[in-house]
Image (cartoon, rainbow, N blue to C red):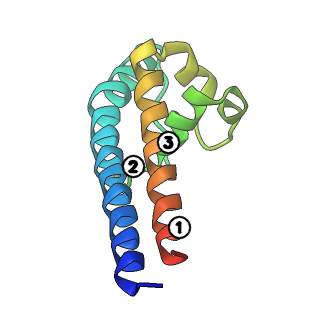
């Protein structure tokens, strides 16, 4: 077989993968600026604080997004997932789904490009 065909297929997969990486990056920014701020302001009204262990690293972003998308993930000791779900709006759920799917597709396509 022609090696240039495999190289171009790999390149196409990588370009698609990195477009999903870009979408993932944008969705994390949107989640942080729209969802996280909204939910944490509602939690503050209740007197609840963000997790103490997450001082500036932002790991709670993926925990909150997972709690919004999957009810079973709301029962984590790392964050108050039930409260996060309580205040999540439909737009927050959409952003969370896009964030998870785009990262998963980026990851899978990057790995798949190595086997082409």
Give the residue at mark 2. Answer: 58
CA separation, marks 3 and 2? 16 Å
Residue 4 shows up from this direction: yes
Q: Are marks 1 and 3 in contact (CB under 8 Å)?
A: no
The answer to whether 24 appears left or right of 80 in the picture is left
Q: Are marks 3 and 2 in contact (CB under 8 Å)?
A: no
Secondary-structure class at tag 1: helix
Q: Residues within 10 Å of mark 3 (few under 14, many from 20)?
A: some
CA separation, marks 1 and 3? 18 Å
Question: What mark, if any, has residue 31 been given in the picture?
Answer: none
Residue 80 shows up from this direction: no
The answer to whether 105 appears left or right of 41 in the picture is right
Q: Earlier in the sequence, mark 3 or mark 2?
A: 2
Secondary-structure class at tag 3: helix
Residue 102 x, y percent position in the rendering = 43, 45
**What residue is shown at x 40% (from left), y 63% (from top)?**
13
Give the residue at mark 3. Answer: 100
Q: Earlier in the sequence, mark 1 or mark 2?
A: 2
Q: Earlier in the sequence, mark 1 or mark 3?
A: 3
Residue 48 x, y percent position in the rendering = 49, 24
Q: Residues within 10 Å of mark 2 (few under 14, many from 20)?
A: few
Number of numbered discs on residues: 3
Which of these two is toward me, 12 or 90?
Answer: 12
Secondary-structure class at tag 2: loop
Question: What mark, if any, has residue 112 been given in the picture?
Answer: 1
């Amino acid at each position: 077989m022609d090696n240039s065909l495999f190289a171009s297929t790999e390149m196409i997969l990588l370009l698609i993968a990195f477009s999903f990486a870009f979408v993932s990056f944008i969705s994390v920014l949107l989640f942080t600026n729209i969802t996280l701020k909204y939910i944490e302001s509602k939690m503050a009204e209740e007197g609840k604080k963000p997790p103490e262990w997450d001082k500036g690293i932002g790991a709670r972003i993926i925990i909150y997004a997972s709690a919004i998308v999957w009810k079973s993930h709301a029962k984590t000791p790392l964050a108050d997932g039930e409260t996060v779900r309580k205040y999540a709006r439909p737009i927050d759920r959409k952003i969370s789904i896009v964030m998870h799917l785009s990262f998963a597709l980026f990851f899978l396509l990057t790995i798949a490009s190595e086997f082409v």
